[in-house]
Amino acid sequence: MPTIVVHVMPKPEILDPQGKAVGAALPRLGFDGFASVRQGKRFELAVDGDVTDELLAQARDAASTMLSNPVIEDVVAVEVVD
């Protein structure tokens, strides 16, 4: 069953307190070398049947209107995984 995966991230100018908290915790847990962390969202849309161009367009529309808040978030990827 194919899946359409949508990745959403906060816009660069938006503060990311969750990402900051994770970024601060990494060195305390022994994970060094990371300059910063941004936390986003991932949606997996399971598809019945084949992924058509029309269905992919619907997923992109849903991503930009419902799965993300366009004021503070960017849809960074909409991809099909099998």
Image (tube, rainbow, N blue to C red):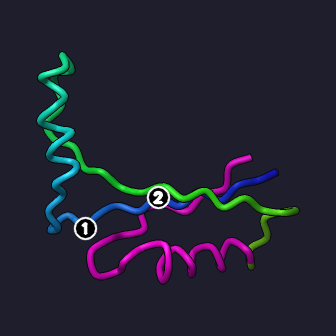
Farthest-out residue, top: 30
Q: Position of residue 1 (x, y in %)?
A: 82, 51
Q: Position of residue 42 (x, y in %)?
A: 48, 55
Residue nearest the viewer, comparing 66 with 74: 66
**Three-letter residue code for mark 1:** Lys
Residue at the spot of label 2: 7
Residue at the spot of label 1: 11
**46 is higher (above) or lower (below) than 29:** below
From mark 2 to mark 1, how far is it between C-alphas? 12 Å
Please provide the residue range marked out in magenta: 55-82
Q: Image check: 74 left or right of 16?
A: right
**Residue at (30% x, 51% y) in the render:** 39
Q: Position of residue 35 (x, y in %)?
A: 13, 36
**Residue at (46% x, 58% y) in the render:** 7
- Whether residue 6 appears in magenta in the rendering, the answer is no
Q: Position of residue 51 (x, y in %)?
A: 78, 64
Question: At numbered mark 2, what does the secondary structure look like: helix, strand or loop?
Answer: strand
Farthest-out residue, right: 49
**Residue at (67% x, 55% y) in the render:** 80
**Three-letter residue code for mark 2:** His
